[in-house]
Structures are given as structure tokens and as C-alpha cells.
Amino acid sequence: MAYIPAKTQQRLAAKMGKFQKLIRKAIDQDINESDTVMIVTDILSEVFGYEKFTEITSEYAIRGTYCDLAVKIRDKVRLLIECKAVGIELKEQYVKQAIDYAVNQGIEWVVLTNGARWKVFRVIFAQPIDKELVADFNFLELKSRSQRDLELLYMLTKEGLEKLALQNYYDKQQAVNKFTIAAILQTPEVISVIRRYVKKLGDGINPGVEDIREILLTEVLKREVVEDEKAREAAKRVAKAIAPRKKKQ
């Protein structure tokens, strides 16, 4: 659970209702993209705590080329925001230009929003360049008394960005996902435990380590969590994490 400073939590809870009403009204009026950008700018300022005229900028917003808004902290761009009209369904293809620009500028975080729906992406600096959806929430469904909802918002606040809340949230996702669990199941330590329990099922039952590994890879685990690039990355993280313990032993 992320620690949210009291003042920040009070601001999030107090401003949430105001902008939920404003967004619903905007949906009813079917406002255009330019007006949606104005609402998002106000959300960035009043809800997320950025200085409107010094930390929120459209300097990088060459329409059709880059993105609509950029958030700067101490003159460094930390977040790019691509906006669509409030009634537009968000598709990941809409964020491509912002991702391309983020890559060129070394910016890790990109947001795609229509005011109501917010999608947060982490740019993956690899070959080829990729993106990963880290958070996806509907602002209209958030509740001011829900700690989980407040934590989702906190990640995008000025205070949260400075405390690396978004990065920490991403790291936790990476630590507990299907690729990591699959990688852990394939470690010699876990296979040894599985083998020990299988042997207890009856006399003469004595599968080899490779037998169990083969069953895991071909019959238990999906190919995706074994052969995907993310699976290989997870395997490296797990191997690195358990390596110190092996040295101590």
C-alpha cells in the first residue's frame, strides 16, 4: 500500500467529485478534443497538483506529430499525455505518436486519456521499441473513500511522481505476474519441492527432475509464459534474485 501524504489525500478526495460532475456534463454535451484537453489540464492542476503555468505545457504538442500535453518537474518532462475527445473510445494505436516522441526524448511514461478513462503506459526501451499498459482506470468510477482508488490517482500526482510511485507500482506488477510465477515454478528449488511431494504419492513413484520440468513446460504452463520475451525477462529477474542466496549457501 502506497503512503499518501495527508494533504495530497485530502486534495484527491476533495477534487474528485467536482471533476466527476464536470466530466459527466462534458459527455452529455459531447465536447470536442480541444475542450477535453482543457478539462484534462484542470485535472492535472487541481487534482494532481501540478502548477498550471509552469509544469503543464503544450510546448511539445505539435498536433498530429507529438502529443497534447507534457508534465514537467524542475524543467524536465516526466509525463506525456495524449488526449482524445471525451466521447472517443481509447485505442492503444492513438498513443503511438506520443510513444515515438517519448522514445526520442528518453521519457518513460505516457498517458492516453479522454478525461474519463485514463491509460498509463511505460515505454519499453528495447529493440523493437514497445509499451506496456501499467494502469487503466475510469475516473468516473473512483470513490473518494476507497484507498485503492486514491492510490491509483496518487501515482499520477506531482508528489507521487517525485516519490517514484508510478515506478514502484510497475515494479510490484512485475514481481507478481504470470511470467514471474512461471519463472519461479521452473527454478531448481521449486522443482525439487514438487518432486518431493510427488514421491509421497506412493511407493515406487520417483520422477526425475527433468521429468517434472518437461511436464511443467509442455502440459502445465502456457507457451506464452515460457517463450514470450517477457518470460525471458522474468526468468532473468528471478535468477538474479535467488543468486545471492545460492552464494551464501
Image: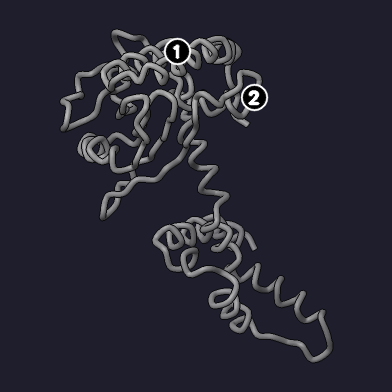
Q: Which three-letter amino acid code belongs to the residue tagged 1? A: Leu
Instruction: Give the residue number, with chain letter if any, for mark 1.
Output: 22
Q: Quadrant of residue 213?
A: bottom right
Q: Are marks 1 and 2 in contact (CB under 8 Å)?
A: no
Q: Position of residue 12 (x, y in %)?
A: 54, 15
Q: Secondary structure at mark 1?
A: helix
Which residue occupies the foreground of this view, 79 or 26? 26
Taking the spot 62% from the left edge, 59% from the top edge, the residue there is: 248
The disc placed on residue 2 is none
Secondary structure state at the residue bearing disc 2: loop
Q: Residue at x 21, y 36 (%)?
A: 101
Q: Is residue 162 left or right of residue 131?
A: right
**Residue named by callout 2:** 146
User: Toward which corner of the image does residue 111 lie, by quadrant?
Assistant: top left
**Is residue 27 shown left or right of residue 248?**
left
Q: Amino acid at mark 2?
A: Ser
- Give the x, y percent position of residue 238: 53, 58
Q: CA distance from mark 1 to mark 2?
A: 20 Å
Q: Quadrant of residue 219?
A: bottom right
Residue at 34% in and 15% down: 41
Neighbours of disc 2 within 10 Å: few (<14), some (14-19), many (20+) = few
Q: Is residue 160 above or below residue 177?
A: above
Please tell me whether residue 153 is drawn above or below residue 43 in the rendered image: below
**Colour mode?**
one colour
Q: Nearer the viewer, mark 1 or mark 2?
A: 1
Q: Nearer the viewer, residue 64 or 205?
A: 64
Q: In the drawing, does residue 193 fall left or right of residue 109?
A: right
State the quadrant of the N terminus. top right
